[in-house]
Image (cartoon, coloured by chain):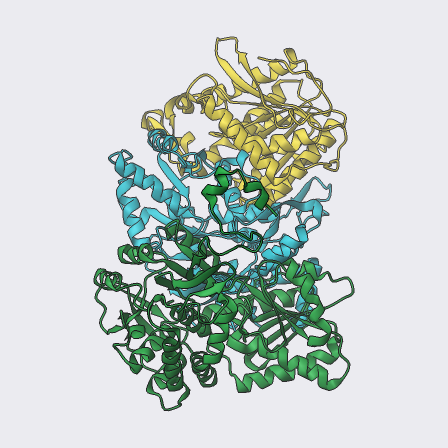
Chain colours: A green, B yellow, C cyan
Amino acid sequence: MSTQPRTIPAIVAGRLIRSPRGETRRVVTATGMELILPLVSEADATSIIATDRLALADLPTQEIVAFLYGAGQNWKSSEYVRRKLYIRDLVQCLGYSEKMAKLEANWIAMLLSSYASIYDVIEAELGNRYVLDEWIPREEAQIRAYPRGRSLHILPGNVPLSTTTSVMRALITKNSVVAKFSSEDPFTPLALAQSFSDIDPNHPIARAVSVVHWNSADLGVSGKRLVEDADVMCVWGSIGAIEWAARQARPDLEIIAFGPKHSLALIAELHEKHEIREAARALAHDVCFRDQRACFSSQQAWVQTSLDLFIPELVTALDVYADVLPRSAHGLDDRAARALTIREARFLGYPIFEGKDGIWTIIVCPADFASQHPLSRTLYLHPWTHELSLESIVDKQTQTVSVYPWSRLKHVRDRVCRAGAARIVECGMSNIFRPGGAHDGIFPLQRLVRFASTELPSSAFTKSVTVKIEQTKFLEQDRFVEFIP
Amino acid sequence: MQQDSVSSTASSDELGRVDEDVIETGDGRRIVVWRTCAVTRDARRGTILLAPGFCRRMYNLATLAQYLTFNGFEVYRYDPLNHLGPSSGVLYDFTMSSGYYGMNAVLSWLRGERDVDSLGIVATSLSARHAYRACGERHDIDYLLTAVGVTHLRATLQRVFGVDWAACERELLAPTVVFEDKHVIHGPPFWEDAYAGDWWEGTTTQRELDSVDIPIVAFAARDDDWVQPHEVEAALGLSRHRERRLCELAGSGHNVSQNPAVAQAMLVSMTGEAMGLAAGFDRPLDVKSEPTFTQITEQIIKERRLSAREGS
Amino acid sequence: MTARCLEPERTDAAGQVWVLDATTAIDTLIFSDSPYWYGLSLEVQQERTDRLVRAAFEFHLENCPLFRAYVEREIGLRGIGSLEEIPLVSTRAFKFSEISSVPASMIEQWYRSSGTSGLTSRVPRDRRSLERLVGSVHSVAGLLGRWDDDGAAVVNLGPGREHVDDVWFQYVMSLIEAIHETDSIIPSSLNDMERIAAACKRRLAEYDDLIIAGPPFYIASVCDFLEERGRPVQGESRITVLTAGGWKRVAGADVDRKAFRAQVRQAFNLTSEAQIRDVFNQVELNSVLFECSVHEKHVPPWVHVAPRDPDTLLPVPDGQLGIMSYLDASCTAFPCFILAEDLGTVVRGKCACGREGVRVDIVRRVETRAAKGCALTMGRLHAARQRQ
């Protein structure tokens, strides 16, 4: 492992800036690697602001999709240098296991290459897959979706999937992109942007993407300029990040917030061994994917099945995941958080099951065992008793409720969604956001566009009025009332 | 000064309340006195006068006063003449006789003006020497308790200052003596008075106490560098006075409050002894009530602030 | 009443002389001024630590059923080899359990931490524990400076005794007034600042020494005010500034302690930065740790401090960062064998101040994923539900 500090570049309007043009900031990663992060400079901000925020506005959607597909196909190839470098960075700098890093690269490939899904998402969220390119009839008007302009993304450091999703959404809706990376993951947005330049450095999409950084605690003059310049901001992260965004933003800035959420699982009563095994494997996936760092990761599970039957299967399943998707390196803070939780649970006398070297943990506890969740593949397992009120375990901070089996528990959706849950999925599927589904209660593409409407002229009758609309005449004749249905 | 009505049931307002009086002595000087009343529902056990140690203030006795008031006693404290507090005179002019004069004035006031019924004294350190003499010369004290009480002034001062003052020639005395690195006393008058008043020797104390027939309980610290238990024992003459007792505090020096556990043990024991003596028994009674840490600290703070407001 | 002499030892036939022995080894150590504990050699200190912590362990095993059950589950009741084997109680446990080793009648109060987010810890104290806490403060008199109780006054940048309830930090600060003449002023307005400056000048005229105590951000605010007013307080060698209460990020950056000390020294016209000391305590710890003149926090020998490896909970080598654990023998109210939410280091041996001992550096708080927003503080969630 190199002990030399590594300088992270920036990307300004598609151009790679290898050496920082302003101040820098040093951070140490979970693997002990020292990174020198460039703080966005005056020159960077000026260059970005000078670019045409509507550079993609006239680019047909199909070209954008095709471009992304091309990038995705590169990512799919195990020989793609960008992919290899990305995997290496995740492993060496962020402590990902080789398998998990590959999985991240694969998901980037999947998202970029899923052209059919992209069209489906546009159709589902905006109403028509051509609405970004053409005027689409709708009732007595025609609508068209225009990009808002410059989108600013305050990216998370815990889930590369979110970075890819956020950038893609903005590009699909023809917004230019300024991605501010987290100190915990500079690599995903940079690799993504560079993979666009790999296709064609002069392509409008490549030129429409910038990747910069600033210290969350101190925006700086340049960061402030970029915030003020933005037309829409996507904020991922803590409540502090959301509040920060609200403070910095202009009153008319559209903020799309993906704040802290937690997720849980519900397992019905199962008796057949194969069913219990399937449920355990599905739950293990939702716990282990992304090491529980994603909002959709199950942190708790309520189980009706006998725990004497369920826990052994869950232990086996978690061990499988320890092998197929080894956990990433955890820094001192993550390990300390886990230690505190374990000690607390032990003090209270709750049964604890741990994987080898603490790679996963199951704590069987009452639902009111309220220790700060350490993530790191820790599952709070609660017996699901008759007295349990589903409404009491869910609120607006609940993102995903995964259920097993789907057929018997789908019905809980009315209760948990009314109580605040954003989505219901089958156990084992929490990381797959199907086209058509909402994200944290909204359809993000709708917030990334401006809908304009062209409304029919007076010669077009309304549904309830069978004459041409002549308002002045109606006023003169005092006939308004007769047109009221 | 406001005269409080005596009550055996203390309200929350009375808890910890300190009332102040000023005694005018025959020679025109003033002695400031604090009174705290009993705060229990039990029958009152009488009155106790607390006499402070040298260069100690009335609020330094706050906890002892609390223990006693929590267990039925009415407690008076005073600032000696020629001392640090608000009473007349300055410390520079302190002598044993001025200290004794002040104590006697307060005792007479309590018996005369306040018409107290049972009256005991708890005297600490140097004031114990005054109390021993007072018990011999007066006949209106019912019992005496002392804590690290000086019986042999000469020996104690020699340990404190490293010099046998009594053996010094008058002309060779330093004009001032500094106690605890900051309290300045005018040496020669003190020395002269100690001779004139026959204060120096432990044998004097012993002789004075020989004629005393009231119960005395003395608390002496085993590791006291200034007052040694064997001196106290000798002064008390235990074999000739069955009504007297001596308690040795293990693990304590002259400053008993330095170790709170030891201090608490002494306070409980002293209070129990006082309760027994006040009731006419020759054994201690069980202490029913102790102030909590919170009550103790709040009272200390309250009294400290009271002293500060007085500019004393 | 904890005197060991239930039946007084009568030393004479007539029963007129008896011995009252309320001493304990730990009280003798805490309250002794000859020598002060920091004057002992490291070897002696460590021997005392071992003995005292073991005695405390036995005490809490006997008196705290929750702790006893926990120890029995973890290591059995066969006894411990080294102190590191004592099962640690996560400080989080105090947020959700009432852990006590004394009967309710002996508890002075349940104190809580001053956290403003999430749940706070609730920790009991009995009289003995509080006295020893005060003792841990008083015992460092020589470590900080040469004052006596009546020779020094205090300006406490916090609420006075009558305004604190059960918030631990404020309560501890307010106890100062039981030892020294104290002005308590919270610097929340310009008027307050002026009162603070006036109090400093007045007390310097009345007393030999002045102690100014408060959280770092309050001290910094006062310094800013004094700079604006042309530094009217002439502290020279007579002021000691004690910072207590944790170091928060100021203006988005970690506070540079060296820069802070330079600022304080200048604002109060102090002779030396050695007059500025930080102190550490938390509601779950019964002893206060003070900095010496070279700004190292010396650990008293009744406390065993060890940064631990989070995975094994074994102590890490000197100088290495670990999750902090404390075994505090001075506490009788609850088993003060805690795993705290801080990361820090420990060194042993001779300090540059000339004294031997164990010194601790509390580097920072554990930064959890929850703090970064990726996992909700479940406590908040469930506590909110419980309150519904």
Identify the residue shown where x is 65% and y is 36%.
B291
Q: Is residue B83 left or right of residue B290?
A: left
Q: Taking A255 as reference, is A320 above or below it? A: below
- Residue extending farthest bottom: A79
Asked whether residue B41 appears in the rendered view, the answer is yes
Q: Can you tell which quarter of the image residue A254 is in?
A: bottom left
Say left or right for B72 vs A195: right
Residue C259 to residue A22: above or below: above
User: In screen coordinates, is A480 left or right of C1?
Assistant: left
In front here: C10 or B240?
C10
| Quadrant (top left, top right, bottom left, bottom right) of the N terminus of chain A | bottom left
Measuring from the top left, give residue A368's x and y in whole percent: 67, 60
Q: Residue at x 36, y 91 (%)?
A: A79
**Residue C41 visible in the current orientation:** no
Give the residue drawn at x 23%, y 68%: A20
Q: What x and y, as percent, mark residue B148?
A: 56, 36
Residues B194 and C321: in front is: C321
Q: Identify the image quadrant of residue C39.
A: bottom left
Q: Is residue A381 left or right of residue C361?
A: right
**Viewer-proximal residue, B200 or B288?**
B288
C139 or A472, nearer to the observer: A472
Residue C147, located in which quarter of the rendered image?
A: top left
Instruction: Count every numbered label the image shows and give the total.
Output: 0
Q: Position of residue C139 (x, y in %)?
A: 47, 48
Whole-percent x, y for residue A403 in the image: 66, 73
